[in-house]
Amino acid sequence: AVVSTQSGHYGRDDGREKEDESKAIEFERTAETRHSEKVAARQMNLDAKAHHPPDSFFRTLDSSVKKNSVFVKKLSSLTEQNRTKLVADLNSLNLTKYIEEVVNAICSAKLKMQDMNCAIHLCSLLHRRYSDFSQLLLKTLQSALSNLNKEDKVTRVRIELRLLGQMLVLGIITDQKEGFTLLHTTLCKIVESDKDRLEFLPAMVSFVKHCGEDILGVQSTKNRQLIEQHNITVPAMKILAKDKQQIFAGLLKEYSSAVILTLVKLHNKLMKCLKHNKKTLLVKGEVSAEKIELSEKLSAQHSKLLMNATTLAELLDITIPDLPSLQQLEDEEMDCNSPTNANADMSEVSLWEDEDQKTFYRDILDLTGRVPQILYKKDKAKADQKAKEEESKKKKVPTATLR
C-alpha cells in the first residue's frame, strides 16, 4: 500500500513537471514568434520612407469626398470587429488630402483595449503609404499628452500612452529621438504629479503590460521565473540601449513604490475601521450606518487599488509586502485564552460615538449661571423656604427624643 501511495505521488510530480516543461516550450515558441513579427514590422516601417508609392499610384484610387469623409468618420469609432472593412476602404481610397483628419480621428477615438491592435495595424498601413502620416501622428500625440488634466483624462491618457509606446516599438514614429523624449517627459509628469491620487495607475499598468519588455527591458515575475527555471533564452528588441531602458524602468518602479505605499496605508486604515466596527458590535450590539458606509467605501477602494498594484508589481517583477488580514491582526494582538487581554481589548471601545456625544450626556451644564434670574426667582424662594423647614424639623427631632 505504501509503494502504491508513493508511486501515485511520484506520478503526480512527473505530470506536473511535464506540464511545466510544456508551458516553458510554449512560452519560448510564442516569444520567438512575437519577436520575429515585431522585428519584421519595425524594419518595414522604418524603411517605409524609401518605398512610399509614387503620385501616379494615388491617381488610380478613389478620391471621392463623400467616401473619404465616411471613412474618416468610421475611424472615430473603429473596433476590432470592423478591421477587415476598414483595411479594404483604406486600400481603395486616396486619403492624401485627409491624412490630418485621419490622424485626429484615430487619436481621439474612444478605443477599448481590445480595439488597440486594430488601430495600430491601421496606423502601420497608413504610415507605409503616406509619407506625412508619421510626423502628423507624433505632433498630435505631443499636443494630446501636453495636457494631463483634460476631460476624460484617465481613459484618454491610457490610450495615448499605449499608442505612443507601440508606435515607437514598431517604428511607425520614425523620429525615434523625439518620440522617446515625449514618452520620457510624459512619464516624468505622471510620476511627479500622481503619486498621491494615482489617477493614471490604469494607464501605467496598460503601458507596462504592452511595452514593458521592449522599452523598459523587464520581464514579469512569472516569465522571469519560467526563464530561470527552464534556462530559456528570450530574444529582445534592440530599440534602446540598456542604460536608457533603466531610466524608463526606474520611473515606473518609482511610481510603483508610491502605489505600494498608498496601498499599505489604505490597508491599515481599512483594518482599523473593520476592527473598530467589530468591537462596537460586540459592546453595543449595532454599528452606525455611517461607520458601515465608511468601511464599505474603504473596502471598495482597497480592492481596486490592490488589483492594480498587484498587476503592476508582477509586470515590473517587484514584491508587495504582506498585508495581514483582520483575523491575523487580532491573533497577533490578543491571546484568546487570556481573559485579562480580552477585557483590556474590549475596554478600548467607547460607549460614545464621538467626543461631542460623550460631552452632551456626561457634562451637565449649570443653568443658573446662564438663565436670567427672573425666570426662576419664585422657584428659588420656594426651594429656600422648603430647605429651612427641613432644617427646622431636623433640630426638633432630638429634643422630643430626650423627653
Image: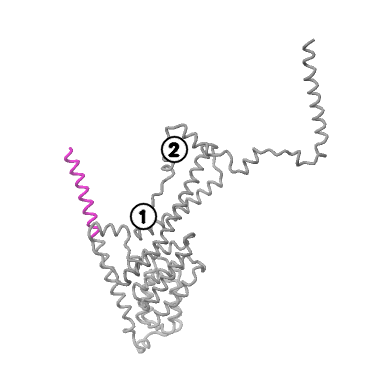
Q: Is residue 182 above or below residue 61?
A: above
Residue 21 against residue 148 in the figure, above or below: above
196 left or right of 94 in image: right
Overall secondary structure of the magenta section? helix
Image quarter (top left, top right, bottom left or bottom right) of the N terminus: top left
Question: Where is residue 3 shown, x and y percent of the image?
Answer: 16, 40
> Residue 152: within the magenta?
no
- The residue at which mark 1 appears reads as 319
Q: Residue at x 40, y 80 (%)?
A: 133
Q: Which mark is residue 334?
A: 2
Which coloring applies here? one colour
Identified by mark 2, the residue type is: Met
- Element under disc 1: loop
Q: Quadrant of the C terminus?
A: top right
The 10 Å Cα crowd at callout 1, few under 14, some 14 to 19, many 20 or more, is few
Name the residue rendered at 77%, 12% in the picture. Answer: 401
* Residue 23 belongs to the span the image colors magenta: yes
Q: Position of residue 294 (x, y in %)?
A: 53, 49
Could you say where residue 269 lies in the image, as x and y percent from the top left? Answer: 49, 49
- Magenta stretch, residue numbers: 1-24
Query: Which sits in the foreground, 279 or 19?
Result: 279
Residue 57: image location, x then y, percent: 35, 87
Place residue 287 in its image quadrant: top right
Q: Earlier in the sequence, mark 2 or mark 1?
A: 1
The type of residue carrying mark 1 is Thr
- 226 vs 308, left or right, is left
